Image (cartoon, grey):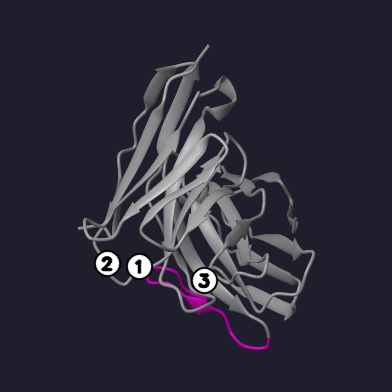
Amino acid sequence: SAVISQKPSRDICQRGTSLTIQCQVDSQVTMMFWYRQQPGQSLTLIATANQGSEATYESGFVIDKFPISRPNLTFSTLTVSNMSPEDSSIYLCSAPLAGDRNEQFFGPGTRLTVL
Amino acid sequence: QKEVEQDPGPLSVPEGAIVSLNCTYSNSAFQYFMWYRQYSRKGPELLMYTYSSGNKEDGRFTAQVDKSSKYISLFIRDSQPSDSATYLCAMPLGGGYQKVTFGTGTKLQVIP
C-alpha cells in the first residue's frame, strides 16, 4: 500500500518561532492536503497543495501564517509561522492514492507543542 | 448546522459485542462515504469506503449507507480490544481530488 511519511514526528517549540513540517509520498500525486487536529477535535483542512501553483487555503487559514511549498509531485512542506500556544496541535498531510481519487490516505502526523 | 454530525462518545463495550457507530450529514451532494480509524497518537487509517446506498462488508466491519435519510453507520462484529480507537466518518464531495469533511469522531473502548 502507499506510504506517506512526515518529519518531524513531534517537536516542542518556543513562542514566536517557526517550524517546517515535511510530507513525503511514495508515489506521484497531483494534490496533497494539510490538516490540523487540535486536542480532542476532528480534522480541519488547512489548505490544498497543488504542484506548480499556489496552495488554496480554507477559511480561517492564511498563507502568511501557514506557507506551503509543493516543489514536486511527491513532496510538500507546511510551515507554522510565528507560533503561539494556540498552534499546539497535530498536523497531518494526506493525499488521494490507490487509484481512487476520493480515498484519502494520511501521514502519521506531526505533534507540535508550543510553549 | 454542521455538515457532518457524529456522537463523540466515548463508547465502552465488552469484548465480543457488536458496535454501531453512526453519522448524519446534511449535504445531499455527498456521494462517497468513508470511515477512518485513528489510534491514539497516530494518523487516521482508512477503514471502509463506499459510494452507494446499502451495505459493504469487510471482515468484521460493515459499512451501511442510507442516502434517503442521510445516515451512515459502521458496524463492528465480535469487537476486540484492538478495536479501541477513535472512528471518524468522512465525506468528500466527489468528482476527484476533493477535500474531505470529517465528523468529530467517536471514541470507542472495547473492554476485555
**Amino acid type shown at disc 2:** Asn
Q: Dot 1 lies on which element?
A: loop
Q: Which residue is mark 3?
A: A47
Q: Which residue is mark 1?
A: B30
Output the chain of dot 1: B
Q: CA distance from mark 2 to mark 1?
A: 6 Å
Screen quadrant of the C terminus of chain A:
top right
**Region of the chain picked out in magenta, as a range:** A52-63
Q: CA distance from mark 2 to mark 3?
A: 21 Å
Side (left or right) of A72 relative to B77: right
> Residue A61's mark?
none
**How many neighbours does mark 1 have within 10 angstroms: few (below 14), some (14-19), or many (20 or more)?**
some
Q: Are marks 1 and 3 on the same chain?
A: no
Residue plotted at (74% across, 59% down): A2
Residue A58 vertical placement versus A21 (above, below): below
Q: Which residue is mark 2?
A: B27
**Amino acid type shown at disc 1:** Phe
**How many neighbours does mark 3 have within 10 angstroms: few (below 14), some (14-19), or many (20 or more)?**
many
**Amino acid type shown at disc 3:** Ala
